[in-house]
Image (cartoon, coloured by chain):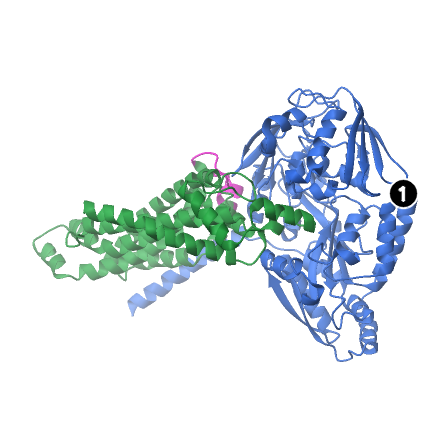
Amino acid sequence: MFKKRCLFVWLTSLLAVLLVLAGCSGSTSKEPNPSKNANPKNQSLAKKEGNSLTIAIKDNLVSMDPQDTNDTLSGSIQSTMLEGLVGFDKDMKMIPVLAESYKASKDAKEITFNLRKGIKFHDGAPFNAKAVKVNIDRVANPDNKLKRYSMFELVEKTEAIDDYTFKVTLKKPFGAMLNNFAHPAARIMSPKAIKKYGKDVATHPVGTGPFKFSEWDQSDHLTVVKNPDYWQAGLPKVDDIKFKPVPENGARVAMLQTGEADFIYPIPTEQAAQINGKNGIVVENKPSIVARYMSMNTTKKPFNDVRVRQAINYAINKEAFLKVVYRGYGSEMDSIIPEGLQFYSKQTPYPYDLEKAKKLLKEAGYENGFETKVWGANNSDAMKAMEFIQQQLSQVGIKVNVVPMESGTLSDKIWSVQNAKDAEVELYYGGWSSSTGDADWGIRPLLAGDSAPPTSYNVSYYENKKVDELIDAGLQTADQEKRKEAYAEMQEIIWKDAPWAYLMVEDTMAGKKNYLEGVYLLPDGALSASEAEIKR
Amino acid sequence: MFHYTIKRLLGIIPTLFIVSIFIFMFVHMIPGDPARLVAGPDASYKDVELVRQELGLDQPKVKQYFVYLGKILQGDLGTSMKTKRPVFDEIADRFMPTFWLTIWSMVWAIVFGLLIGVISATKRNKWQDYTGMFGAVSGISLPSFWLGLMLIQLFSVKLGWFPTGGIESWKSYILPSVTLGAGVAAVIARFTRSSLMDILREDYIRTGRAKGLKENVVVWNHALKNAMIPVITMTGLQFGFLLGGSIVVETVFSWPGLGRLLIDSVSFRDYPVIQAEMLLFALEFILINLIVDVLYGMMNPQIRYK
């Protein structure tokens, strides 16, 4: 009897101690509201020793060869070392970089670049039209089997007209080609390095950028160091930057708290409000160009009826979706492409209106609703989103079964389907980010009639003759006004046709110490660290 | 004993051959198209097909297997589809971090596991026993990602004693190895306790005590040695598991080891890397089993192999 009591007392006291310990490390979670946060900039500057930066990122880096890279992260790191002829500023507006000026011909078949003079690559090779030609010829040659070949497959001819004039001629008109030149894939590498390293330029990047490649321990970090001969005056302002993959969200946040990292991204939305304004940490959220939507297979019943698709748009409370799934970090979608893309034109949103949704369903003959399934990724955000949609649609009698899948399985079941008739997909929760910043790449791969899988990503199997004509029209000319008209009209048509349930545009989420300036995320989620500066 | 060891070592070759067939089959059975994953989220159909040819995935499966086998026999593990580096380099880079983490974890686990196990067995049903077993049950039940994050919060963020992750100095090893070792220590403690309690009831222990041996000598020299057989078996298995790299702990502590490489390569369907890692794990287990068998003989001379 005594022993039992003894045991009881011991277990209870141990439990009590553990609970107290757990309580210490836990934190109160408040309903975060990004706009109403106390101004984190009022904190005094956190301490920083030295002039070196550490940036913690989520995933491992894949390649430092821009022409063979398709992840935004590797591209971001390359941008500290390599530069393109043109590029994007903070708001994804196109700016000249290594080119002084550029001109596209009216028929959208020729682009001429006038290059900056007196720039040298990190290995001493001069930057000129010949160097550009070597780069573009390399990526446009299918025998090189580079991942970015398709962005330059339209290139027919490249010419170094003189030392500082480079001209490219296309096989057919393509109005968005200039954007492809602003894409990370078109960053210029030293021709000397290409010759010396061959395929191994992927681990020996040599460019013209403000930082030079230092070392890459593939299992741990990549470091770049200051380029003292950089052509832009006043840059770079820090000695070196270390990029370190830290896959665990909590660990990344801890690194920022301890000062082991000066900048981290992404920050999980759940933790953003909690750490903002403490320990000299500032959380920055800005509109991205990542759209989140649920596509509906327009060739399948009942989604072949536009009234059903519109009803679904009316039945989802987008504001609540934003709050529940993304903690308010984002904005409602108000066109088929996010505001950050070129040629975006605002549409009238589908308000949350259950009566209207029910009425439309009744007209379509689905008064009592129907049963369907939604597919999507198996990460917690996607699952939360799908469960939310499930709950919302149940209000109008639509029973949705949530089927989360691992990415490989998804790719088999959706993107590798050879024939539209064999497509099992009904609803698919996904997203898209147009890495060229142009409307074309935000629409054509997803909604053009000939973009159905496996060719591209039109998982709604949406086909509209008028839209296809407009998509072509948008590419036939480099005249910005004409392009604008075409994209405005197609946005309106598709918005009303509702092949998707339009949900939201994500925010980019990053955290930094308040002494750090000049490091920021672009709307496409790419990181810019070239202008990094430590304030004292 | 010598002949036995040689025979077992030679036996590794056919075992690995059979294992390689299974690994190849299973890896290729995972749903998902590596060409598409390698080509990237916004690749066009043409890009994907180019990548497929480049990777040799357009060839028939049987041919792919023999190409793979042929290369292995020449000591070539292939090239990673994701990074295009030799698989051998990828694995070699990651092996030592995982190896040292395993050693550190096992040192904690064995020292604390044995100590707690022995104390619990000798102080049966006293407060030492209850505390020890409470700790052991907690060690088994605490999810390691939770424990890891809590340790980071306490020792890195609040106290600033250790770094949050990565490998910088000896300090970097403390938190991950404690996290990883906690579960193993718990298992060792429980095995030691139950095994030792059985032994302590044996006649020869009573004889030992009767002839006036000190209690410490009875427990540590005579009883513990005989209680070790199940503990060694279990410790060997745990050692094998840890050598494969802990996906969770390596992720939480950004540890550049085999576990993270495995999860990366599986999500990328990086066939050559997955295959090579699996083969390595199989080899590790075979070797550890061999070592365990040899250790049996040293612990208990009645067990001999011919």
Give the residue drawn at x 34%, y 64%. A7
Q: Residues within 10 Å of mark 1 (few under 14, many from 20)?
A: few
Secondary element type, mark 1: helix
Examine the rendering and report whether any part of residue B120 can be seen.
no
x then y, percent, for residue B139: 40, 55
Q: Which residue is mark 1?
A: A480
Q: Which chain is blue?
A: A
Tag 1 subunit? A
Q: Answer left or right for B45 relative to B303.
A: right
- Report the magenta stretch's main SS: loop
Vertical comparison of A294 with A179: above or below: below
x then y, percent, for residue A510: 67, 44
x then y, percent, for residue A150: 71, 44
Q: Residue furthest left?
A: B211
A269 vs A336, nearest the viewer: A336
Vertical comparison of A272 with A413: above or below: above
Examine the rendering and report whether any part of residue A132 can be seen.
yes
Q: Amino acid at mark 1?
A: Gln
Instruction: Give the quadrant of residue A257.
Output: top right
Q: Answer left or right for B272 relative to A46.
A: left
B305 vs A59, nearest the viewer: B305
Q: Is residue A490 magenta?
A: no
Q: Answer left or right for B76 relative to A428.
A: left
Picture colour for chain B: green
Q: Is residue B158 magenta?
A: yes
x then y, percent, for residue A212: 63, 26
- Count of number-bearing discs: 1
Q: Which residues are magenta?
A: B153-170
